[in-house]
């Protein structure tokens, strides 16, 4: 059995017979309330202590003095953790830190008074607001645990462990962090803290339900727990977030590799034991003391690195560095600007023409996002780029764009000048299982025929959780007459299987292959292969980023159907589109018939 004693503590004089001073000396109470407070707290059977925000004991009631040995012995300047015996100091300090940060915390301890009776305590710390001393104060209430509830280990497990997985919880992580930082500051040691987040877990929960996702969490936690030892601490922080504490006997890069290997083992175990098609985990890693010497610094830095990992790609582990703070601030600023732009209805579509490279006739448009503050220049989407990584904001922006594009198409249709318009859809759109049905319903309500819409996606939507749902949605849209365009083909995650498995009508050649087309034999070979692929599969090929006549002529001679870029026109407001569509932007023959892939 561990024992703990309240050490000599005093920040205000303790007078006989119990060493009590009026609580009003510490709290801003009116005279009537002062008497009630003193009477109530002094007469309660539970020990009560008042702490300041610096961690010193300011006051103790009669029960604390009577039931816990050494409280009556005078002592000045004792900190909260020094009230406790060594075995409990890390627990006490972690609880104190959590109460300061979150308003409330608990931990468990035992004490032995002068009668040599060991008592077990459930200690609650509660933040009580601004005090006359100029800072927040903490009330510590120690309630004795008796009978079936007795046993410090029972209390500690209930407070420090997650009920679902059995792993240590957030409080357990706080305490382990505090224990390690306190010990290793003196020893000169190092350790790594990693915060792990299961990618797309919210969407997984929506698709599979809580029971199935709880089983996934338990399987993941069990695999992690099997790796735990004296050098590796594993915990579930909250929801689908976990924490690892790893003794840093290796250099940082090797620690990251070690963490990545463990994550992959756990992910493989989950995939092998469940029916889900994909499972990945992102992680942010920070090193003590390189990146911080306090618990809060380490947690904040690990979460900052995790945010960078999430934005990079699924399944990535990122090591913290100092520049990430500024990047995160810029990221947060972008999110705030995007929220204002959405709320203020500053989002608007601009349109870039798609041109038949044989005739020069405008044969279609691509809707591109722009936004504009009143009286300010038009902004590109790069200025709110972070919003597209946020599922909720990305969906809101997409819905605004779709509504405005459909309004423009309906107006052009009434005027007899409507052309097919390509509109981008992101992975966030497909998280709605009824995305296709909702999109088609909008077309029907606006009386817009489906052949006037093209849905443009990148290959990233085919990866990760929910990829199967994307295929279902695309097939539904395509069957209704909406053409599907695959954007940025050949960059990043290009796979010929996507052309085989999904109803792709249009293949877009990325501008990175067009830029150096006249001077790069490699780029010409790649572009020629893409054009040949499109011809053999009856897929229209569109070249993006055409800026010179030389590029346009090469593409036309290679057999490319369609092009777009600054050579023809920059993106323009919807009001200018009817005038633009009447222009022939290149000299040539009559337009060719656009190929449409057989279903």
Image: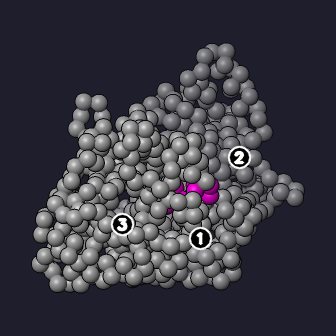
Q: Which corner quadrant of the image does residue 513 belong to?
A: bottom left
Tell me which residue sits at (68%, 77%) in the image.
Answer: 275
Q: What element carries label 2?
A: strand
Residue at the disc numbered 1: 468
Q: Nearer the viewer, residue 95 or 214?
A: 214
Q: Where is residue 18 in the image (x, y as percent from the top left)?
A: 68, 36
Would residue 167 appear left or right of 82 to someone viewing this image?
right
> For the residues carrying marks 3 and 1, which lies nearer the camera in this image?
3
Residues shaded magenta:
426-436
Query: Who comes first in sequence, dot 3 or dot 1?
Result: 1
Picture quarter with the N terminus:
bottom right
Picture quarter with the C terminus:
bottom right
> For the residues carrying marks 1 and 2, which lies nearer the camera in this image?
1
Q: What element carries label 1?
A: helix
Queried whether the magenta region covers residue 522, the answer comes back as no
Few, some or many residues within 10 Å of mark 2 (<14, 14–19, 20+):
many
Would residue 46 appear left or right of 263 to someone viewing this image?
right
Residue at the disc numbered 3: 593
């Amino acid at each position: 059995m561990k024992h703990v004693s309240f050490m000599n503590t005093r920040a205000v004089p303790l007078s006989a017979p119990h060493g009590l001073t009026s609580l009003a000396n510490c709290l801003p109470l009116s005279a009537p309330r002062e008497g009630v407070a003193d009477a109530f707290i002094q007469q309660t059977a539970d020990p009560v202590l008042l702490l300041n925000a610096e961690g010193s004991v300011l006051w103790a009631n009669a029960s604390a003095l009577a039931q816990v040995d050494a409280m009556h012995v005078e002592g000045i300047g004792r900190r909260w953790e020094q009230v406790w015996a060594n075995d409990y100091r890390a627990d006490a300090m972690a609880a104190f830190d959590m109460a300061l940060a979150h308003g409330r915390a608990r931990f468990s301890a035992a004490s032995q008074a002068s009668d040599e009776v060991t008592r077990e305590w459930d200690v609650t710390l509660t933040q009580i607001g601004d005090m006359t001393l100029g800072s927040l104060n903490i009330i510590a209430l120690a309630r004795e645990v008796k009978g079936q509830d007795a046993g410090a280990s029972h209390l500690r497990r209930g407070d420090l462990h997650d009920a679902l997985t059995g792993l240590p919880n957030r409080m357990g992580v706080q305490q382990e962090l505090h224990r390690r930082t306190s010990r290793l500051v003196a020893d000169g040691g190092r350790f790594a803290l990693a915060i792990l987040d299961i990618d797309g877990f919210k969407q997984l929960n929506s698709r599979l339900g809580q029971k199935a996702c709880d089983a996934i969490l338990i399987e993941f936690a069990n695999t992690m727990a099997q790796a735990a030892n004296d050098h590796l601490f594993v915990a579930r922080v909250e929801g689908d977030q976990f924490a690892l504490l790893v003794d840093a006997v290796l250099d940082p890069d090797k620690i990251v590799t070690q963490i990545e290997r463990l994550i992959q083992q756990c992910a493989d175990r989950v995939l092998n034991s469940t029916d889900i098609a994909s499972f990945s985990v992102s992680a942010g890693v920070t090193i003590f003391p390189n990146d911080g010497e306090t618990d809060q610094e380490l947690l904040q830095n690990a979460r900052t690195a995790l945010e960078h990992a999430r934005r990079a790609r699924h399944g990535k582990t990122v090591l913290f560095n100092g520049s990430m703070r500024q990047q995160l601030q810029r990221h947060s600023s972008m999110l705030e600007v995007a929220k204002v732009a959405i709320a203020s209805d500053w989002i608007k579509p601009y349109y870039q023409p798609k041109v038949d490279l044989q005739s020069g006739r405008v044969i279609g448009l691509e809707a591109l996002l722009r936004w504009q503050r009143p009286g300010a220049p038009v902004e590109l989407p790069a200025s709110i780029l972070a919003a597209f990584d946020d599922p909720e904001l990305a969906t809101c922006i997409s819905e605004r764009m779709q509504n405005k594009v459909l309004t423009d198409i309906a107006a052009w249709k009434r005027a007899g000048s409507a052309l097919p318009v390509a509109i981008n859809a992101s992975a966030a759109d497909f998280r709605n299982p009824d995305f296709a049905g909702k999109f088609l319903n909008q077309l029907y309500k606006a009386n817009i025929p489906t052949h006037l819409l093209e849905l443009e996606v990148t290959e990233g939507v085919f990866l990760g959780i929910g990829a199967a749902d994307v295929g279902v949605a695309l097939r539904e849209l395509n069957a209704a007459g909406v053409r599907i365009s695959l954007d940025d083909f050949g960059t990043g995650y290009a796979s010929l299987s996507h052309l085989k498995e999904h109803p792709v009508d249009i293949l877009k050649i990325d501008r990175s292959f067009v830029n150096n087309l006249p001077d790069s034999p490699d780029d010409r070979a790649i572009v020629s292969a893409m054009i040949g692929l499109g011809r053999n599969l009856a897929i229209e090929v569109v070249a993006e980023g055409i800026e010179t006549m030389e590029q346009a002529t090469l593409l036309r001679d290679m057999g490319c159907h369609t092009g777009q870029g600054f050579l023809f026109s920059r993106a323009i407001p919807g009001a200018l589109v009817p005038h633009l569509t009447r222009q022939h932007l290149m000299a040539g023959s009559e337009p060719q018939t656009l190929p449409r892939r057989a279903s």
